[in-house]
Image (cartoon, helix red, strand yellow):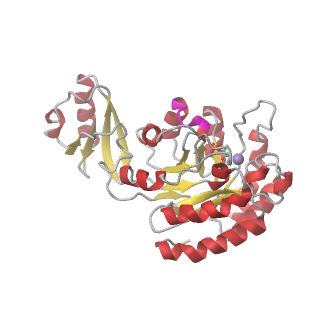
């Protein structure tokens, strides 16, 4: 249940609404989402009479959202949302390309790839400091040792940077050294991490779990939103199916389906979605045609030498030609790249 507040609702009025919620054994959480101040109520709300709140001072509307996700829903917020990441806008009318290596490997690699993707027209850098790897013997990322490389890149180039948090500790470090927090597919239902991300001032890139339904994904988004963080961007990265021809099955059909249910921006990651760099351009173009708000693409100065995910990683030259194709196509579907 969402209590939509009047624009001038006072702190005292919000506290009175929260006190009424606690009397009804509900947990109130004031949040600001999509430019609207709201008190979101959790607990057994289905039997609660909206009249318990509608007459309280400061209340504009009581919304009983039918879906189990609320703040991500179109019922709450009809218009598409834009998320600002350090000056880069992700949302309607734009097509935002985030690129970079699977892992940050060295200061030289981080600097070289940043210059390359910027020259090709990418808007943001993504590179893993903490890597959630299937095998414990695989490279786990530089972690804190990679922070200096990122600090130098951001200082010298001004590029906005997103990287994955794998636990609360890494999230806290990332908050000091990045502009956006990635929550990876494997962590989409790490509820403690989602709650912590909900308390962050940084926007969140929320990847779809590899076996998550759209509904589960949107409820994960509400974990972040209901903590008070309105900056959530979804990212489709492929799901696990019976297919053996690709690392994952990139579910582009989820884009129009998600558009019906949520106002949040949606990116597509054709690198993890295919597992094959030769297949990335086709699926990147298809994502643009399908209405995605942008892409997440793995690019490395020398993919054959990449410590992780080399097979699906483009070299700067191929990335540059993909960007040219995307720039030609974007205006046809009402997007500025
Ligand atoms: C990644 O972005 O490098 C990554 C591990 O992605 P995912 O969580 O989608 O597997
Ligand atoms: Mn990767």
Q: Residue at x 72, y 53 (%)?
A: 276
Instruction: Point out residue 335 in the picture as x, y percentages from the top left corner.
Output: 49, 71
Q: Residue at x 30, y 48 (%)?
A: 76
Q: Quick check: 145 left or right of 224?
A: right
Q: Quick check: 155 left or right of 179?
A: right
Q: Is residue 237 visible?
A: yes
Identify the magenta region. Answer: 186-191
Quadrant housing the C terminus = bottom right
> What is the residue that sits farthest to the right in this orientation?
305
Residue 113 vs 309, above or below: the answer is: below
Instruction: Point out residue 132 in the picture as x, y percentages from the top left corner.
Output: 69, 37
Residue nearest the observer in this picture, 292 or 94 = 292
Is 188 included in the stretch rendered in magenta? yes
Residue 330 vs 314, above or below: the answer is: below
Residue nearest the observer in this picture, 218 or 33 = 218
> Residue 188 appears in which quarter of the rendering?
top right
């Amino acid at each position: 249940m969402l209590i939509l507040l009047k624009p001038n609702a006072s702190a005292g009025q919000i506290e009175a609404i929260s006190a009424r919620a606690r009397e009804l054994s509900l947990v109130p959480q004031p949040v600001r989402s999509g430019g609207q101040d709201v008190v979101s109520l959790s607990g057994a709300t289905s039997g609660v009479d909206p009249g318990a709140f509608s007459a309280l001072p400061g209340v504009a509307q009581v919304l009983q959202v039918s879906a189990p996700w609320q703040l991500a829903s179109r019922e709450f917020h009809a218009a598409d949302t834009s998320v600002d990441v350090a000056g880069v806008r992700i949302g309607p009318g734009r097509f935002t390309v985030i690129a970079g290596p699977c892992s940050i490997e060295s200061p030289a690699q981080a600097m070289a790839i940043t210059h390359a993707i910027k020259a090709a027209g990418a808007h943001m850098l993504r590179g893993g400091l903490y890597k959630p790897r299937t095998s414990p013997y695989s490279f786990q990322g530089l972690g804190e040792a990679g922070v200096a490389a990122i600090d130098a890149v951001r200082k010298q180039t001004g590029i906005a940077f997103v990287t994955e948090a794998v636990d609360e500790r890494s999230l806290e470090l990332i908050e000091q050294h990045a502009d956006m927090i990635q929550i990876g597919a494997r962590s989409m239902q790490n509820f403690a991490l989602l709650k912590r991300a909900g308390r962050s001032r940084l926007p969140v890139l929320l990847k779809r779990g590899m076996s998550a339904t759209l509904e589960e994904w949107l409820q994960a988004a509400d974990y972040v939103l209901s903590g008070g963080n309105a900056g959530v961007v979804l990212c489709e990265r492929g799901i696990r199916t019976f297919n053996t021809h690709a690392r994952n099955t990139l579910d582009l059909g989820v884009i129009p389906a998600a558009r019906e249910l949520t106002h949040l921006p949606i990116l597509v990651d054709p690198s993890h979605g295919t597992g094959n760099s030769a297949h990335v351009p086709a699926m990147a173009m298809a994502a643009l045609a399908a209405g995605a708000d942008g892409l997440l693409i793995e690019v490395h100065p020398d993919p054959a030498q990449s410590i992780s995910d080399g097979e699906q990683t483009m070299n700067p030259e191929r990335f540059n030609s993909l960007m040219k194709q995307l720039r030609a196509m974007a205006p046809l579907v009402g997007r500025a790249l």
